[in-house]
């Protein structure tokens, strides 16, 4: 059986009734803990059997008949998604809703989990400028935030921290003046974002940009700059970049590099957005796996 998720549509009214009956057996606190466990163990690439076993384990008050009915109607991914999006606004949830907003922007390329120095940026966006977005949910702490913002600020033109609206005052104590702040709040079946402070453009460090390049990226950057003879060894490529190109040229080339590197993945996710169960957005960005194949029962 093949199930496709389309936001805004109610798939199978009976499924929703059975799910509501299941949820009525648990307190909100229990449901939050259930969803926390599901979020920790969930993996798109796990077998259908394993996902249903995970649900059976955490939903201890649920009968086998109820779970069996759900299984005949939907894939386990959808049940897990519906629970987490309703009761546990973790990073996966925030990434989905923020990406949904970015889809409205034209001529932008978006990427997830890009390595920068000793950190990994949650979301980055590239157009005429480059943007880094670090997400701290209401369940997170600000540990390592100083290091993360410092790393991002050497590579991206503008850096933003995204926090729950109740964390705004505390967040401002932990970020430098150039770092922007975006707050979020849950509203029914949606998450709303609001600028609390706009970011100031950084003086991106050209040397740091070069140091952060992988071997393949250094070759691609030289190609984008227009270099015809690209050295075989990475050390030679790095020396050529340092000696021949100024910081402004490197900044422009680096943005082109990011666009070239991520545009195919971003286009795939954008075009298949309504076919992807929200909790799986980042996984599909990484793999470009067909939703039809992933959700086939």
Image: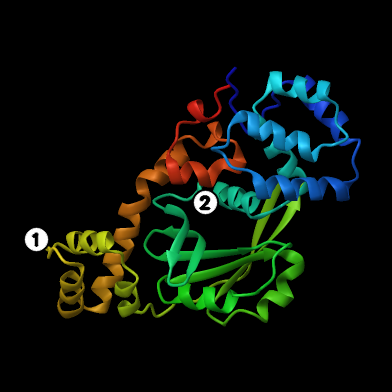
Q: In the picture, which quadrant includes the N terminus?
A: top right
The label shown at residue 122 is none
Q: Is residue 89 left or right of residue 149?
A: right
Neighbour tally class for label 1: few under 14, some 14-19, many 20 plus, Cα within 10 Å: few
Tell me the residue at 51%/44% (across/down): 283
Q: Is residue 289 left or right of residue 237?
A: right
Q: Which of 270 and 152 is in front in this view?
A: 152
The label shown at residue 228 is 1
Marks 1 and 2, Cα distance to the nearest angstrom?
Answer: 35 Å
Q: Which of 190 and 14 is in front in this view?
A: 14
Q: In this view, does 256 lie above or below 278?
A: below
Q: Looking at the picture, how far across and down is residue 6, in whole percent?
A: 61, 30
* Sooner in the amino-acid sequence: mark 1 or mark 2: 2
Q: In the picture, which quadrant includes the C terminus?
A: top right
Q: In this view, does 90 lie to the left or right of 99?
A: right
Q: Splitting the image into 4 quarters, where does residue 202 fall?
A: bottom left
Q: Are marks 1 and 2 in contact (CB under 8 Å)?
A: no
Q: Splitting the image into 4 quarters, where does residue 184 fall?
A: bottom right
From the image, tell me which residue sits under label 2.
102
Q: Nearer the viewer, residue 122 or 67?
A: 67
């Amino acid at each position: 059986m093949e199930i496709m998720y389309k936001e805004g549509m109610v798939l199978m009214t009976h499924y929703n009734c059975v799910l509501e009956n299941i949820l009525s057996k648990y307190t909100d606190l229990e449901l939050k803990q259930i969803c926390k466990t599901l979020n920790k163990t969930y993996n798109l690439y796990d077998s259908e059997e394993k996902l249903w076993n995970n649900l059976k384990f955490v939903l201890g008050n649920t009968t086998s008949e109820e779970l069996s009915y759900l299984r005949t109607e939907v894939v386990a991914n959808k049940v897990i998604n519906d629970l987490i999006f309703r009761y546990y606004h973790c990073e996966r949830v925030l990434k989905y809703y923020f990406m949904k907003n970015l889809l409205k922007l034209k001529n932008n390329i978006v990427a997830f989990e890009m390595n920068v120095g000793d950190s990994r940026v949650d979301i980055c966006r590239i157009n005429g400028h480059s943007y880094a977005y670090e997400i701290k949910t209401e369940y997170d702490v600000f540990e390592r935030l100083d290091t993360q913002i410092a790393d991002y600020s050497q590579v991206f033109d503008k850096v933003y921290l995204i926090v729950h609206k109740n964390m705004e005052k505390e967040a401002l104590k932990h970020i430098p003046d150039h770092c922007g702040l975006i707050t979020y709040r849950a509203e029914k079946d949606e998450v709303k974002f609001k600028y609390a402070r706009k970011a100031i453009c950084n003086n991106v460090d050209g040397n740091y940009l070069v140091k952060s390049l992988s071997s393949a990226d250094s070759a691609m950057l030289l190609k984008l700059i227009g270099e015809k003879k690209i050295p075989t060894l990475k050390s030679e490529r790095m020396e050529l970049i340092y000696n021949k190109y100024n910081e402004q040229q490197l900044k422009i080339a680096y943005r082109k590099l990011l666009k070239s590197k991520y545009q195919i993945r971003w286009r795939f996710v954008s075009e298949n957005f309504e076919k992807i169960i929200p909790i799986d957005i980042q996984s599909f960005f990484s793999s470009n796996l067909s939703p039809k194949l992933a959700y086939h029962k």
